[in-house]
Amino acid sequence: MNNGNNKNLIIAMVLSLLVFAGWQYFVATPQMKAEQVRQQQLTKQEKAAPPKTPGLASPAAPSRHMTREAALKAGGARVIIDTPMVDGSIRLTGAKLDDLRLKTYHDTIDPKSPEIVLLAPRGTAYPYYAGFGWVGQGVKTPDDNTVWKQSSGGVLSPGKPVTLTWNNGQGLVFTRVVAIDDKYMFTVADSVANSSGKPVTLYPYGSVERQGIQKDEGNIYLHVGFVGVADGKEVDAKYGDFKDAGTPPKTFASTGGWVGITDKYWMAAAVPPQNEHFDGQYLGTKTASGVEAYQASYRLGAHTVAAGGHATVTHRLFAGAKVVDILRDYQNRQQIVRFDNAVDWGMLSFLTRPFFWVLDYLYKLMGNFGLAILGLTVIVKVLFFPLQSASFRSMSKMKKLQPEMERLKKQHTDDPQKFQTAMMELYKREKANPISGCVPILLTIPVFFSLYKVLFVTIEM
């Protein structure tokens, strides 16, 4: 018996070794070789690929957070921004748009309360800023530590642009002309002149970045986080999509479109030239100091600047309140694809958009949103009156049939099938439909949900 058991054990061990050897030879080794080939291909691709857009910067540790005023003073020289709608400044070191307040909106209904702060510099509790520039392999390009020189202009205001310049010491001179309109749109014209004696290849980029979220207002009624348009379709992502460490960026490509980060009422969005192809991405991560950081960015294709030549790319930045008329004006006048999608119209946009238009029209006509809402309610009631009337008639007919239904129920107490057949014959004979009374009620659900959505997400309301 023991000899038999030992023999079986030896056979089992030999078979196990054969299976392991076979798996190693036929499965593990080919997989390992395939992975080696894949890694070699990735290495070749990375070497040949264009340089990446500058990634998320690491903010200061929470214990070192400064007030906004202290951060502005510590950042060095700045260009002042002053328009009818916004005020703020641009830091010359890095030339990022990192300081912007909305003059016509305040923390409370008191007009003397602090202005809404949209963009804020690094070092504060919630940095939020936008940057534009160039990247290239083997080429010194402007970065966060570049000290630009203001070569023309004073205070940045409508009709009064400012010009910033920087020489990389290698034959390239970068020039940035920043302009702003009387609302919320910045225009950033980036150009580079090449006197190095040889052609250089550069890739323009734009990005919006924020670190830390004061309050995530996202819920089933409202989208906040990443928002943009690519290939004519909305491309968005929530902050929570990047809650897990190592989550890869969400990438997309398009000719025409834009990328940004939105709150309930405010947004910062970078807009590339609408006739150029771009590669976009949304990225979220945790920095070394444990702060959640988010970036929406795009990179344009290669721009080769010949020796003695120059190249210019014009970016735009929207930074302000999501007022529908303003967004649609930019969409139509500046041909920014579906820019009013910055407002979260939701899945029922075929209802929420016209509802907003009617409410906005009635408000402008009456001067009071309460009256405008009452007016829209009356219009909806009038439109639904035929359906409601049919519903009332159906319910009245069903009420009249109630005694007969009770009689049939008692007659066929022991045979539910005969009772159902008799009920169907009764409905057919009397031309009654128990479902028809519910249809108008079901139809009103998306209508009033859409009305609530409009009131909830639009700043005009």
Image (cartoon, rainbow, N blue to C red):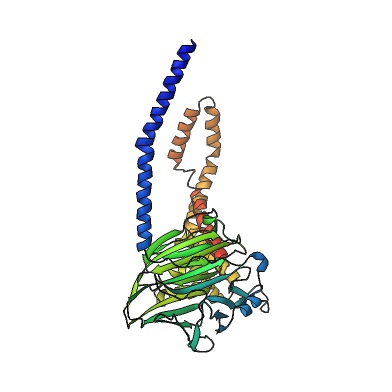
Q: Nearer the viewer, residue 369 or 14?
A: 14
**In the figure, residue 456 lies in which quadrant?**
bottom right
**In the figure, residue 134 lies in which quadrant?**
bottom left
User: In screen coordinates, is 380 left or right of 45?
Assistant: right
Whether residue 325 can be seen here: no
- Give percent across and percent down for residue 347: 47, 58
Q: Is residue 392 above or below residue 225?
A: above
User: In screen coordinates, is 166 left or right of 116?
Assistant: left
Q: Is residue 23 above or below residue 366?
A: above
Which quarter of the image is occupied by the C terminus? bottom right
Q: Residue furthest top?
A: 1
Q: What residue appears at the point 44 percent right and 67 percent down from the top-left corner?
A: 53
Whether residue 47 can be seen here: yes
Q: Nearer the viewer, residue 243 or 232?
A: 243
- Give percent across and percent down for residue 236: 47, 61
Q: What residue appears at the point 53 percent right and 28 percent down from the top-left corner?
A: 411
User: In screen coordinates, is 369 left or right of 43?
Assistant: right
Q: How many marks?
A: 0
- Give percent across and percent down for residue 316: 45, 76
Q: What residue appears at the point 37 percent right and 48 percent down from the top-left corner?
A: 36
